[in-house]
Amino acid sequence: ECKTCPSEAYCWGGNMIGPRSSYWRHSVMSDNFEECPNHSACEGVDPFVTNQDLKGECATGYTGNLCATCASGYQEVVRYYCSKCKSDAVSAVILVVIVIGVGGLLFLVVRSALSQGSGSDVTVYSRIFMNHIQFIMLLGLYAVQWSDETGEMIRFFETVGTITERILAIDCFLETGGDMPVFYQKLIIVALMPIVIVVCARVIWWGIEKSGRTTRDAAHEGFLTTITICLFMAYSDVSRKMFSVFGCQKIGDGNYYLVTAMELQCGTAQHITYALSVGLPGIILWTIGLPFVGLKTILKNKDILAHPTTRKTYGYLYMGLRSSKYFWESIVVYRKIIFMSISLFLGFFGVVVQILVAI
């Protein structure tokens, strides 16, 4: 039986058929061609050469299903986009520079909150800016065929806004090919990030207090201010990572694979273990728990929100809002949760349904 050549493929007659650039297929026995999330990663086949792998080729640095996995020696810069690992020394220097840069930014925001109160322009605008880029980043979770310009903008904001991912750009240092894939290694690390933030903030302010540079009460205020701001900035990254272990997509061979780690099959014993032992507790504790604790704290102190101490410690969550809408930031946070949930759990119904529900 003869079939019309698919628009996504080159056909030479008989069973000689291969994917065009930007497309991929699971095996040479399949006539189902799927569009790659990163078009440049899928080179397809050469239409002028017949003696080649008709499954199609991935670009250098890419491998696996839909050519969406970074090959050994490469690391993910933003989702589905890879870059070659530098030497260990250069990678270590880059990581240190990123940590210092992010730490310096947090220092300026925290210092501004403590010196001027969290109603200062720096703290209010930094919260607005973070919310803005985080919502733009969420657009990248939806499988919409954006224009080249829009796609570039989303990837730019993903690079700028994923603070936790930038600090944890350690793929080149993690062991590959072992029993625990890099995705699950990073899942565990990100799940522990809020605890690390709290511990580091406690140690820093304990050291400042013991050095005699501030009083015990001032150190406690500084500690609360620091974890409020840091957890707020890391919240979206941590939540996205926890949700990602539940986001699956049907491809190629009819099996489901993780959307953010196409080489990992969903429903396996390993996947279920990490989803239930790391992903689910992370969603309950951090994605749902942190906004709840923040809202509960604001409601508890709603009568003294204008007090200087309250403004310093928790003002990052409500300053710049109308006095009657002091709780609005919690609504914004839960909207982010809903957006993430829709992108992952309604993916089976197609992008049109996702967008309609999200709107």
Image (spheres, rainbow, N blue to C red):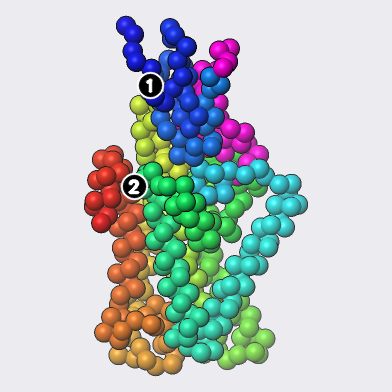
**Magenta span:** 48-75
Give the mark, 1 or 2, whose residue is nearer the N terminus. 1
Residue at which label 1 appears: 6
Provide the secondary structure element on which disc 2 rests.
helix
Residue at which label 2 appears: 344
- Residue 13: x and y in percent read 44, 9
> Which callout, 1 or 2, points to the residue nearer the camera?
1
Q: Residue at x 53, y 49 (%)?
A: 78
Quadrant (top left/top right/bottom left/bottom right) for the N terminus: top left
Asked if residue 8 can be seen in this view, the reply is: yes
On residue 270, the disc is none
Task: Specify whether residue 52 is painted magenta.
Answer: yes
Count of numbered tags = 2
**Apparent side of residue 248 relative to residue 193 in the rendered image (left or right):** left
Q: Residue at x 60, y 90 (%)?
A: 214
Q: Residue at x 35, y 88 (%)?
A: 305
- Residue 302: x and y in percent read 30, 86
Give the class, few, some or many, for how many residues have Cα within 10 Å of label 2's Cα (few <14, many ≥20): many
- Towards the viewer: 338 or 78: 78
Give the class, few, some or many, for how many residues have Cα within 10 Å of label 1's Cα (few <14, many ≥20): some
What kind of residue is marked 1? Pro
**Apparent side of residue 314 relative to residue 216 in the rendered image (left or right):** left
What kind of residue is marked 2? Leu
Provide the secondary structure element on which disc 1 rests.
loop
Quadrant (top left/top right/bottom left/bottom right) for the C terminus: bottom left
**Apparent side of residue 212 relative to residue 290 in the rendered image (left or right):** right
- Towards the viewer: 238 or 135: 135
Asked if residue 242 can be seen in this view, the reply is: no
The answer to which image quadrant residue 136 occupies is bottom left
